């Protein structure tokens, strides 16, 4: 593929635009499977770009390798990095998936299997890399900070007092994200009819969600509690499986199958308990604190990346901030909402 694109560079824009709109996040396939090395230089916050001095690619293309600012992360000028490379719409090399030299690169999603990321901040960096730093992206980032803080400290109260509004707002937000993604992939400037189509789709999904809440509020609460129990137990099980994954390298497939089956069964049992338990509100408080903290830290990290603000050590600050927010949010919810009325749901 790499030799073909070098011989016929006019094919690159179509392939790249199909796989990676604007190349603000890692494409599914690289220009070449070989990772290149170079020195990071010329950070340009105004343009949202940086450049990498790579003699190997410079001798072929006659220019430095460009990299989007969201891919730079905490790397500073002069850092020796290795990276994957593709061609952008100008037929120039563009880097993604930057790693400091002597640091192993993240495996692809297909090769990861059941292995979780080495640390939580790597997931944050990958998600933040997909964000846009334009006006629409900044609105979503600021909204994420506000929603994350509210969910961290008032998650259960919002669920209890405004269950229908919460589901409608979630439906509208998800539809809006899909619509904005569609608009960004459209060729040329966005027209008014396209914006109206997105708005109509958001309102339609919000209306359908409102009707579902009006007709089946208790059933939706029970279903949500069931899914919450499954996801919570499943997350714990996946974390334990990831810890034991290294020890399974020489084990039999039967042992792996038994462990995964047991984890799935326990997750279903936990979901059934959550749907029937009267004290499930504490699980709601914990989960909303975790999700709200993750959303807050992710949004703040994305905002700092777009503003070209880098803190050292960034990974440690992300981990500590997330843990402190979870503990503080859970404590606040228990202290001020622990005596609120419980969720009563019917047993299956």
Image (cartoon, rainbow, N blue to C red):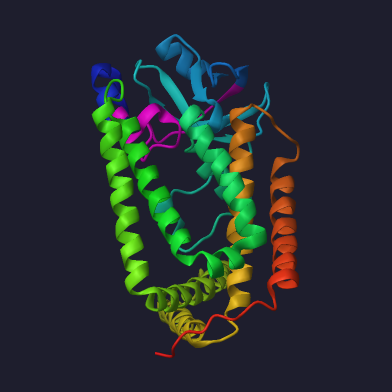
Number of marks in the rendered image: 0
Asked whether 203 or 120 is in front, the reply is 203
Q: Quadrant of the C terminus?
A: bottom left
Query: Looking at the picture, does residue 159 appear above or below residue 187?
Result: below
Q: Quadrant of the N terminus?
A: top left
Image location of residue 233, percent across then percent down: 53, 76
Q: Quadrant of residue 27?
A: top left
Asked whether 124 or 162 is in front, the reply is 162
Q: Is residue 328 left or right of residue 252?
A: right
Residue 23 covered by magenta stretch: yes
Q: Is residue 140 visible?
A: yes
Q: Residue at x 31, y 64 (%)?
A: 211
Q: Residue at x 45, y 85 (%)?
A: 272
Image location of residue 39, percent across then percent down: 61, 22
Q: Residue at x 35, y 69 (%)?
A: 214
Q: Residue at x 32, y 72 (%)?
A: 215
Q: Name the residue at the top extreme.
A: 62
Q: Name the residue at the bottom extreme.
A: 347
Query: Looking at the picture, does residue 132 appear above or below residue 327?
Result: above
Q: Is residue 103 visible?
A: no
Image location of residue 309, percent across then percent down: 68, 29
Q: Which residues are magenta?
A: 17-39
Image location of residue 72, percent across then percent down: 58, 30
Q: Quadrant of residue 171?
A: bottom left
Residue 292 covered by magenta stretch: no
Query: Looking at the picture, does residue 201 appear above or below residue 30?
Result: below
Q: Is residue 316 left or right of residue 98?
A: right
Asked whether 12 or 152 is in front, the reply is 152
């Amino acid at each position: 593929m790499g030799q073909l694109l070098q011989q016929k560079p006019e094919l690159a824009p179509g392939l790249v635009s199909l796989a990676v709109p604007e190349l603000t996040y890692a494409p599914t396939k690289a220009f070449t499977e070989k990772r290149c090395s170079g020195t990071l230089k010329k950070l340009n916050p105004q343009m949202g770009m940086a450049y990498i001095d790579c003699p190997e690619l410079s001798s072929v293309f006659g220019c430095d390798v460009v990299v989007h600012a969201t891919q730079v992360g905490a790397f500073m000028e002069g850092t020796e990095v290795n990276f994957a490379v593709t061609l952008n719409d100008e037929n120039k090399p563009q880097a993604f998936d930057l790693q400091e030299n002597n640091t192993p690169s993240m495996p692809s999603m297909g090769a990861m299997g059941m292995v979780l990321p080495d640390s939580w901040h790597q997931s944050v960096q990958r998600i933040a890399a997909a964000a846009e730093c334009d006006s629409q992206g900044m609105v979503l980032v600021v909204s994420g900070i506000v929603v994350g803080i509210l969910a961290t400290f008032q998650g259960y109260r919002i669920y209890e007092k405004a269950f229908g509004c919460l589901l409608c707002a979630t439906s509208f937000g998800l539809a809006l994200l899909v619509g904005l993604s569609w608009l960004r992939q459209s060729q040329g400037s966005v027209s008014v009819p396209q914006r109206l189509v997105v708005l109509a789709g958001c309102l339609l999904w919000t209306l359908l969600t409102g009707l579902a809440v009006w007709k089946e509020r208790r059933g939706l609460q029970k279903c949500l509690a069931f899914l919450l129990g499954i996801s919570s137990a499943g997350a714990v099980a996946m974390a334990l499986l990831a810890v034991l994954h290294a020890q399974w390298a020489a084990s039999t497939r039967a042992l792996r199958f038994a462990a995964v089956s047991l984890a799935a069964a326990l997750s279903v049992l936990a979901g059934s308990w959550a749907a029937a338990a009267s004290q499930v509100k504490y699980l709601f408080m914990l989960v909303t604190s975790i999700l709200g903290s993750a959303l807050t830290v992710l949004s703040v990290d994305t905002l700092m990346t777009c503003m070209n603000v880098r803190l050292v050590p960034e990974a440690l600050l992300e981990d500590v901030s997330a843990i402190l927010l979870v503990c503080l949010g859970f404590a606040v919810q228990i202290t001020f909402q622990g005596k609120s009325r419980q969720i009563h749901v019917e047993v299956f």
